[in-house]
């Protein structure tokens, strides 16, 4: 009962942040609202899932509302070992969004995405593109660190993917760059996509162009492929109407 009430409170704050005055509460034929104990977590998330993606209002507030909604999430077993939920960071109004796979050790400690060695490489890529981290938004498909950095399991991705979908719907970037195979396959919901074949070519996610490229951690191990990622980044810059080192 307490958990259900907290879920509803969190959902109310989320709706408020989105600018809703009224809530789509289900009313029984007898004219009574469904009792709180009958409202399961899944019901709340179904409601979240049908939220329109083009709400007006402050995007920072909307992201805060979503973070509140996630709360101390226990929706999958990754909650048991994590230190921090790594929600995402950057500019809520970003035109470019980077999406990785999951937090690593350093991210789990700091609660921020891409802050370890791979993160430093991503920062260098962003700066080479003529941007700053504050200009873009960075998040992961999975918000909690998998033990020993193993690949996230299917049910973990299924439990968490609604959150990245909602972040994308709020930010509505002009272009998304996915980093690595897992982010690509999870976002596109296509487990057969191969990063080596897909990278360098724009895909479509709900009308937003998606450029798959390598994960920075892979590039640390395979520095010769940095040239390929730079080529992918240049295509992104062209799509944004930017050239490297020059902000328009
Ligand atoms: S990975 Fe996602 S669904 Fe799983 S506990 Fe963390 S926030 Fe919740």
Image (cartoon, helix red, strand yellow):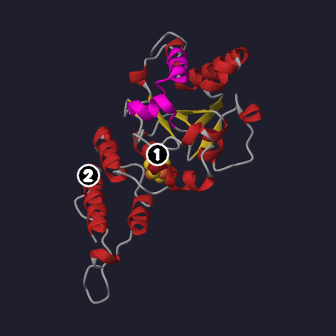
The vertical placement of 176 against 189, above or below, is above
Answer with left or right where residue 6 lies relative to residue 82: left
Residue drawn at x 77%, y 34% as measured from the top left? 197
- Residue 215: say if magenta: no
Residue 63 horizontal side relative to residue 107, left or right:
left
Q: Secondary structure at mark 2?
A: loop
Q: Which mark is residue 81?
A: 1
Q: Which residues are magenta?
A: 103-125
Q: Dot 2 surroundings within 10 Å: few (below 14), some, or many (20 or more)?
A: some
- Of marks 1 and 2, which one's residue comes earlier in the chain? 2
The one nearer the camera, 202 or 104, is 104
Percent of width and height locating residue 204: 62, 42
Q: Residue at x 48, y 10 (%)?
A: 246
Question: Badge 1, how many Cα within 10 Å: few under 14, some, many 20+?
Answer: few
Image: 79 above or below 93: below
Q: Compared with residue 198, is residue 43 higher up or lower down, i.e. above or below?
A: below
Along the line of sight, which residue is nearer the eye, 7 or 14?
A: 7
Count numbered badges in the picture: 2
């Amino acid at each position: 009962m307490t958990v259900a009430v907290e879920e509803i409170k969190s959902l109310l704050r989320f709706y408020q942040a989105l600018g809703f005055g009224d809530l789509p509460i289900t009313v029984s034929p007898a004219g009574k609202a469904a009792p709180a104990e009958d409202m399961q977590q899944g019901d709340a998330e179904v409601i979240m899932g049908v939220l329109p993606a083009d709400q007006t209002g402050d995007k920072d507030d909307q992201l805060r509302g979503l973070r509140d909604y996630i709360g101390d999430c226990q929706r999958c077993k990754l909650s048991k070992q994590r230190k921090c939920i790594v929600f995402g960071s950057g500019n809520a109004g970003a035109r470019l969004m980077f999406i990785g796979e999951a937090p690593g050790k350093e991210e789990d400690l700091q609660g921020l995405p891409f802050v370890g060695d791979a993160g430093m490489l991503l920062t260098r890529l962003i700066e080479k593109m003529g941007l700053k981290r504050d200009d873009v938004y960075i998040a992961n498909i999975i918000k909690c660190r998998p033990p020993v950095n193993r690949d996230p399991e299917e049910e973990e991705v299924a439990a968490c993917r609604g959150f990245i979908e909602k972040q994308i719907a709020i930010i509505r970037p002009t272009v998304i760059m996915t980093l690595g195979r897992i982010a690509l396959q999870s976002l596109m919901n296509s487990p057969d996509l191969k990063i080596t074949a897909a990278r360098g070519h724009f895909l479509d996610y709900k009308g937003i162009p998606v450029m798959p490229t390598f994960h920075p951690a892979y590039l640390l191990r395979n520095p010769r492929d940095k040239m390929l990622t730079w080529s992918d980044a240049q295509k992104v810059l062209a799509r944004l109407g930017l050239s490297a080192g020059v902000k328009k």
